Image (tube, grey):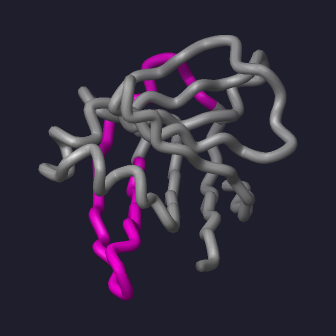
Amino acid sequence: MKSSYHFVKFDYKARLDSIYVNILGSQESQESFQVSENVIIDINSEKIPVQFKIVDASVLFQEKKSLLKNLSNVKIDLKIDSEFVHFKGQIDFAIDNDILSKEIDVTAPNDIKISEMQGTYAAGRSF
C-alpha cells in the first residue's frame, strides 16, 4: 500500500459551518464520498483525494463558530484499503496563548473503490 505525506491549506467557513482542507497541487474534484455524517472526501477522476470537508463543525466539536474561526493546525491520517476508508483528523484552534485540540475518527466501507493508499495531510499556521 502506497504511503505519502501531503501539504494542505485549510479554512473554516462560518456561513457554511464547514472546515475545508484542500490538498496542494491536486486536480479538480470529480466526485464526493461521504465517510460519515460530518466527513466528505472529494476525489478526482483517478479516485485520489483532493479535498476533505468537515461539515456542521460547530455541532460536531461542540464549540462556538467564533472559536472555530481560530483554526490553527490540521492533521489528517487517511488509510484506504479495498474494504474500508479510515479517516482520523486532529484539528487545533488557537485560544489566546493556548491550543484546543479536537479529534474525529471515522471509518466507512470503500463502496466506490477509492484507490488503496495511506497518507498524512497536514498544515499549520504560525502566530
Q: Residue at x 24, y 27 (%)?
A: 37
Residue 123, horizontal then vertical, whole percent: 64, 64
Q: Nearer the viewer, residue 7 or 58?
A: 58
Residue 121, horizontal then vertical, whole percent: 62, 58
Quarter of the view holding residue 1: bottom right
Q: Residue at x 73, y 58 (%)?
A: 6
Residue 48 visible somewhere in the drawing: yes
Q: Height in image: 72 above or below 60?
A: below
Q: Which residues are magenta?
A: 87-114
Residue 126, horizontal then vertical, whole percent: 63, 77
Q: Is residue 121 left or right of residue 96?
A: right
The extreme top residue here reads 30
Is residue 100 shown in magenta?
A: yes
Quarter of the view holding residue 91: bottom left
Number of numbered callouts drawn = 0
Q: Residue at x 70, y 61 (%)?
A: 3
Quarter of the view holding residue 51: top right
